[in-house]
């Protein structure tokens, strides 16, 4: 996988993590269910991003 692709995935994962940290600072202003849903969405985005990165790497290796 090209270094630029790796950098894009790393930036995407960092943005998801920083969004979670930033939201944690305001979590007290929202209901528990809202906070739980936000963190489930962020966790889903994290898993999907890792899945896409793994697939991108696997397919590139398989095709070469």
Image: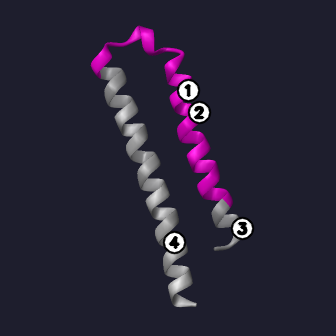
Q: CA distance from mark 3 to mark 1?
A: 27 Å
Q: CA distance from mark 4 to mark 1?
A: 28 Å
- Residue 14: image location, x then y, percent: 61, 43
User: Which residue is painted at 52% across and 63% down in the image?
Assistant: 53
Which residues are drawn in magenta? 7-33
Q: CA distance from mark 1 to mark 2?
A: 5 Å
Check contact, mark 4 vs mark 1: CB within 8 A. Answer: no
Check contact, mark 2 vs mark 3: CB within 8 A. Answer: no
Name the image quarter holding the N terminus.
bottom right
Q: Secondary structure at mark 1?
A: helix
Which of the two labelled residues, at mark 2 and mark 4, occupies the earlier sequence position? 2
Q: Which residue in the protein does label 1 denote?
A: 21
Q: Is residue 23 above or below residue 30?
A: below
Q: CA distance from mark 2 to mark 4?
A: 24 Å
In the image, farthest residue toward the bottom: 64
Which of the two labelled residues, at mark 4 and mark 3, occupies the earlier sequence position? 3
User: Which residue is painted at 32% across and 13% down in the image?
Assistant: 31
- Residue 27: image location, x then y, percent: 44, 15
In the image, farthest residue toward the right: 3
User: Which residue is painted at 50% across and 66% down in the image?
Assistant: 54
User: Which residue is painted at 52% across and 89% down in the image?
Assistant: 63
Q: Which residue in the protein does label 3 denote?
A: 3
- Is 47 a magenta residue? no
Q: Residues within 10 Å of mark 1 (few under 14, many from 20)?
A: few
Which of the two labelled residues, at mark 2 and mark 3, occupies the earlier sequence position? 3
- Residue 11: image location, x then y, percent: 64, 49
Q: CA distance from mark 2 to mark 3?
A: 22 Å
Instruction: Indicate which disc residue 56 carries.
Output: 4
Of the pair 54 and 25, the residue shown nearer to us: 54
Q: Secondary structure at mark 4?
A: helix
Q: CA distance from mark 4 to mark 3?
A: 13 Å
Q: Which residue in the protein does label 2 denote?
A: 18
């Amino acid at each position: 996988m090209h270094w630029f692709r790796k950098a894009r995935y790393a930036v995407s994962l960092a943005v998801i993590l920083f969004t979670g940290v930033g939201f944690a600072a305001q979590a007290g202003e929202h209901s528990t269910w809202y906070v739980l849903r936000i963190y489930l969405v962020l966790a889903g985005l994290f898993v999907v991003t890792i899945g896409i990165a793994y697939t991108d790497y696997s397919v590139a290796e398989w095709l070469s």
